[in-house]
């Protein structure tokens, strides 16, 4: 973790600034350390270069091992009185959060993806038409500039759009719940390590200071949050961290598409068992959800021939002809009607500017 990232990290519970205790030697990078909130007395580990800023209910007792190992270099206040647990008191987990099984499920999937990842392999999604459409849409709507610091909520496993944004010189702060995904990002994003910052965090408790990011993106995350309350708090958090006037880009699956042929609008019964929880938004719902906090909301539809792309992917993996198919999709997505059948919806909006005069 770069020391400069400290400027924008906060305690996910009370949004207070964090003090750092570092155990490595490098002056710029913090490989291992503790972040401490003097307001609520919580401490958070930095392990393998990734700050772990999760709310209490998602934290594991195993983190205390770091306190034990480094107790001589830390103040008593953390070692003996730190929250939510320390060397004297054990972790009393609050009531199990309803999205925990979902997250574990996600972790397992990510773990299996990690196994198939070879360190020197070219980007796994580079020849994939679906990733190409998403990447081109993100570039067109986000208009990245060299001095942008973009926050990606639910960054996943180094998607193609992240690689393209980094190649344009922007810096990205990627937040994800899954440490496995973050490690994949660390590995694949190594050539861009100066500009890629990774943080373990929860979308409904973002460990990011308010009004800090001029561009925020969240792709394919919101549909996996397993209740209306969870999704609403995630939207509020994404609004909070966007600067007034800043841009917010959201991508999510579309209810009004062929997906409805084999997926229900919501799958609570499968939840945490067979596949991740899924909630399908339609255009008007998405507009309602976003318009409360953001203005200038525009929604378009992408992945207009999704089933074709899936077959295409199998037949012509890595083939250049993906580009033509992707271009056709991008052309169609400019027409408002596309949002009635497209596989996914993309919403672009701006955070409302707070007017001082009434
Ligand atoms: C389907 S992937 C999308 C990844 C990437 N944004 C993309 O478009 O390819 C969803 C990601 O969201 C993460 N995630 C799920 N629930 C989360 C939560 N509550 N907070 C933060 N990340 C979460 C998962 O770990 C996973 O990496
Ligand atoms: Zn705090």
Image: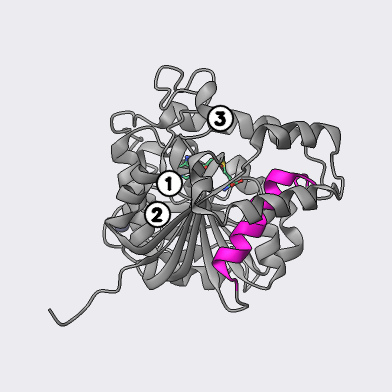
Q: Are marks 3 and 1 in contact (CB under 8 Å)?
A: no
Quadrant where the C terminus sits is: bottom left
Side (left or right) of 181 relative to 239: right
Q: Position of residue 65 (x, y in %)?
A: 51, 42
Q: Tell me where residue 101 appears, x and y as whole percent.
A: 45, 26
In depth, the one of 140 and 33 nearer the eye is: 140
**Mark 1 Cβ and ligand 1 under 8 Å apart:** yes
Left or right of 305 on screen, residue 16:
left
For disc 3, the marked residue is 258
Q: Position of residue 151 (x, y in %)?
A: 51, 62
Q: Secondary structure at mark 3?
A: helix
Say few, some or many: other residues with alpha carbon within 10 Å of mark 2 (under 14 / 14 to 19 / 20 or more).
many
> Of callouts 3 and 2, which one flags the residue occurring earlier in the amino acid sequence?
2
Relative to 233, is 254 above or below? above
Q: Against 313, is 176 above or below?
A: below
Q: Is 117 placed above or below 250 here? A: above
Q: Residues within 10 Å of mark 3 (few under 14, many from 20)?
A: some
Tell me where the magenta segment starts and ends, as one range.
124-144
Which residue appears farthest toward the left when viewing the image? Answer: 358
């Amino acid at each position: 973790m770069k020391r400069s990232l400290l400027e924008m990290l906060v305690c996910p519970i009370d949004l207070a600034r964090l003090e750092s205790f570092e155990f490595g030697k490098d002056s710029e990078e913090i490989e291992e350390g503790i972040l401490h909130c003097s307001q609520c007395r919580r401490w958070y580990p930095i392990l393998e270069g990734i700050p772990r800023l999760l709310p209490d209910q998602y934290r594991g007792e195993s983190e205390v091992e770091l306190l034990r190992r480094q107790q001589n270099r830390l103040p008593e206040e953390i070692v003996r009185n730190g929250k939510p647990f320390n060397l004297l008191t054990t972790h009393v987990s609050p009531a199990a959060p309803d999205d925990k099984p979902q997250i574990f499920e996600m972790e397992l999937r990510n773990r299996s993806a990690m196994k198939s990842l070879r360190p020197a392999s070219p980007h796994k999604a580079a020849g994939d038409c679906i990733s190409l459409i998403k990447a081109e849409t993100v570039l067109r709507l986000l208009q990245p500039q060299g001095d942008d610091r973009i926050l990606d909520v639910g960054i996943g496993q180094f998607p193609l759009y992240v690689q393209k944004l980094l190649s344009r010189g922007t810096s990205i702060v990627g937040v994800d719940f899954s440490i496995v995904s973050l490690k994949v990002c660390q590995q694949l994003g190594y050539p861009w390590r100066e500009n890629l910052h990774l943080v373990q965090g929860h979308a409904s408790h973002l460990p990011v200071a308010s009004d800090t990011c001029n561009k925020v993106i969240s792709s394919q995350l919101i549909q996996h949050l397993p209740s209306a309350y969870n999704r609403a708090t995630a939207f509020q958090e994404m609004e909070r961290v966007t600067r007034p006037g800043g841009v917010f880009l959201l991508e999510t699956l579309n209810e009004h598409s062929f997906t409805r042929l084999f997926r229900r609008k919501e799958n609570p019964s499968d939840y945490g068992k067979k596949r991740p929880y899924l909630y399908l938004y339609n255009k008007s719902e998405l507009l309602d959800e976003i318009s409360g906090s953001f203005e200038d909301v525009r929604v378009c539809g992408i992945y207009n021939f999704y089933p074709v792309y899936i077959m295409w992917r199998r037949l012509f993996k890595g083939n250049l002809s993906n580009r033509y198919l992707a271009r056709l999709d991008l052309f169609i997505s400019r027409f408002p009607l596309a949002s009635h059948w497209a596989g996914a919806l993309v919403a672009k909006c701006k955070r409302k500017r707070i007017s001082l005069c009434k």
